[in-house]
Image (cartoon, helix red, strand yellow):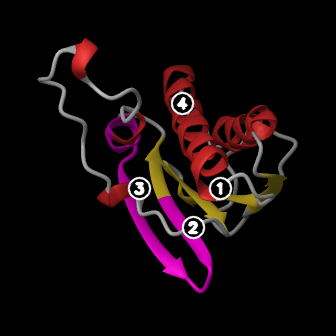
Amino acid sequence: MNATNKAMPAAESASLIVPARIDALLQCTEFVTARAVEAGFTPSRLCEIELVVEEVVTNICRHGYDDQPGQVELRCRPVDTQRLLLEFIDGGRPFDILAAPAPDLTVDLDQREPGGLGVPLIRAMVDEASYRREGNRNILRLIVRAER
């Protein structure tokens, strides 16, 4: 981690491993926000990235481990001077967030199932996304630009 306000070198990567619990959300968002600040992201973009991190980590914590203990690994590194790569790695049940169907927003609110809005939110706020299952791990890779 750099102590100055310069953007991180492209090769520098940081990682964080936390228990897959909702009370680890703040630690995850602070971790990514610090990397994004170092990379020169705008305050409005920082807010969007925090929402993405909260949504992904919340989904892993609530749905990935079926009430069993687990962990979330979060990796962050610059791709170049304008983009960050965020990787979310967990050993929970397989789930490709990118293949999840979009909710039907044409249905009246009182007839819609609760939830389901996080996936479109993530898709709208990231610039590139990919998912793969590697052994018993989910790996979600998101690339975010400093400006949109």
Residue 58 position within the rendered picture, expressed as x and y whole percent measured from the top left: 61, 40
Provide the secondary structure element on which disc 4 rests. helix
Residue drawn at 32 percent across, 29 percent down? 113
Q: Is residue 19 visible?
A: yes
Please, what is the three-letter code of the amino acid marked with disc 1? Asp
- Residue reaching furthest left? 106
From the image, state whether disc 4 or disc 3 is nearer to you. 3
Question: Which image quadrant is residue 22 in?
Answer: top right
First along the sequence among labels 4 and 2: 4
Please, what is the three-letter code of the amino acid marked with disc 2? Arg
Q: Which residues are magenta?
A: 120-141
Question: Within 10 angstroms of label 1, few (less than 14), some, or many (20 or more) residues?
Answer: few
Asked if marks 2 and 1 touch (Cβ < 8 Å), the reply is: yes
Residue drawn at 32 percent across, 53 percent down? 100
| Structural distance between the alpha carbons of marks 2 and 1 | 8 Å
Label of residue 93 in the image: 2
Total marks placed: 4
Residue 29 position within the rendered picture, expressed as x and y whole percent measured from the top left: 70, 36
First along the sequence among labels 1 and 4: 4
Residue ID for mark 4: 51
From the image, state whether disc 2 or disc 1 is nearer to you. 1
| Structural distance between the alpha carbons of marks 4 and 3 | 15 Å
Please, what is the three-letter code of the amino acid marked with disc 3? Ile
Question: Which image quadrant is residue 16 in?
Answer: bottom right
Label of residue 97 in the image: 3
First along the sequence among labels 4 and 3: 4
